[in-house]
Amino acid sequence: MEYINVFIDQLLYFYNEMAVYLIFGFLVAGILHIFFPDSFIHRHLGKNNMGSVIKAAIGGIPLPLCSCGVIPVAASIRRKGASKGATLSFLVATPQIGSDSFLITYSLIGWIFAVFRIIAAFLSAIFSGIMANIFDREQSGIKNISAGKEDNDNWIKRTGQVLPYMQNGVFGPIVNYLVAGLILAGLIGALIPEGFFEIYLNSPFISMLVMLLAGIPMYICATASTPIAASLLMKGLSPGAALVFLLAGPATNTVTITTVYKTLGKRALAIYLGSIITISLALGYVLNILALNFHIEMLHHHQHELLPEWLKLLGSVLLLIMFALHYGRNIKNKLTSGGELNSMTAVKTLSVKGMTCMHCQETVRQAVSAVDGVDNVNVDLSGGKVSFIYDSNDLTHIKEAILEKGYEIAEN
């Protein structure tokens, strides 16, 4: 019974501490997505130079995309003419941290660690891009880049899209991983004794290697990994090892590794993994030295005193409402969509290649829903299919919308 009480206490602690920061991070991500659409990024990443690599890193860092969700976006900018250096820079920077994960890192671990996450994401992205431009250089040039439909929308219409995108485009794809991360953080707090890592994994370098080996193949987003890292720090894990986990875990997984190999080649894959490993271990080492020599307490939370209790409570309530809306909509769709879609003659189905996670599922759903005349869009992630109601037999615009997001249409 004691373990259950500790688990619930830890779960509620992490939830309440991160909720208001998470809400604000979702809002920032929504604003960035609506007012700086994909076509804005596409136009700036086509040259084999330092400028395109830096732009890719800066453009990718605030975006709330996981290591799987970033794949189709990177494929899209690559197909539109982005150099290998810029594409790798974007692939490395984007999943390591976003506006939401930065704010909950600040909330749970502190501002020093949060700043280190940004610096690490930027340096690893720049390093990978430069290495690609030097050792995997290619002929560059912008290919068929158009302004895109988003650029023609007026500002009032875009503003109205911020809240729906927060709920469906940012929160929806990570919600299950966020729940899993909170539960795992609670279990670590309840089951692992105090000082566990100091006793059994007291070598900072070995602990960093262990976190690196655990993080590289794992699929976990930057947001969901943060409470896990905070819980591990509470149990005595070194700050450097926690940083390595937060860099390698969100940035890589088996799906991303195979996709980079297939899309950019084995040399680019070696640069991709080598950059993440090198920068993660180097900055983890630096962070350990800073924490030791300057007696920096990573889990010191003086900043929380600046937040009134009513604001933290409001954040917790709003996040709970977002959970309820998400799971309520999923239940409703399962109850109503199956028989309804199959019984209508206007239903169309396309097979989509490249969907690997919930972010992919939501991206395809939004892309198809945005086409005029489309209704009742249903995306089957496991089956790789999207079904929708559409009166016309000409599916050109729908296929273009899916291709625009970096996915492929498979012939039935």
Image (cartoon, helix red, strand yellow):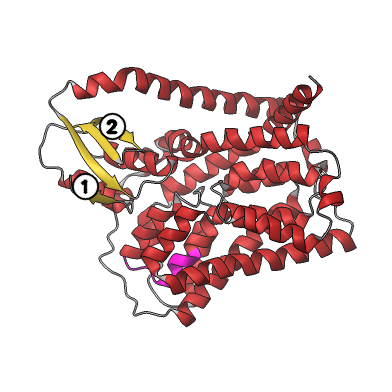
Residues at discs 1 and 2 in contact (Cβ within 8 Å): no
On the image, the x and y values in percent for residue 74 come to 40, 59
Task: Locate the C terminus by quadrant.
Answer: top left
Task: Locate the N terminus by quadrant.
Answer: top right
Left or right: residue 329 versus residue 124 is left
Cα separation, mark 1 vs mark 2, equals 14 Å
How would you classify the magenta stretch by its main secondary structure?
Answer: helix
Q: Looking at this view, is 220 or 104 the one in front?
A: 220
Q: Looking at this view, is 254 or 105 the one in front?
A: 254
Magenta part of the chain: 80-89
- Dividing the picture into quadrants, the one containing residue 331 is top left
Measuring 65% from the left and 62% from the top, which residue is drawn there?
A: 119
Q: What kind of element bears circle 1?
A: helix
**In the rendered view, would you say 396 is above or below 380?**
below
Residue type at mark 1 is Lys
On the image, the x and y values in percent for residue 145 come to 28, 63
Residue type at mark 2 is Val
On the image, the x and y values in percent for residue 300 come to 83, 45
- Would residue 114 be seen by someone viewing this image from the given angle? yes
Q: Looking at this view, is 157 or 30 the one in front?
A: 30
Left or right: residue 284 versus residue 275 is right
- Would residue 115 be seen by someone viewing this image from the given angle? no
Left or right: residue 214 versus residue 327 is right
Counting residues from the start of the chain, the first of labels 1 and 2 encountered is 2
- For the view shown, which residue lies furthest in the left direction? 393
On the image, the x and y values in percent for residue 305 come to 81, 36
The image's mark for residue 399 is: 1
Q: Is residue 4 magenta?
A: no
Measuring 69% from the left and 52% from the top, which residue is drawn there?
A: 114
**In the rendered view, would you say 233 is above or below 287?**
above
The residue at which mark 2 appears reads as 377
* Few, some or many residues within 10 Å of mark 1 (<14, 14–19, 20+): some
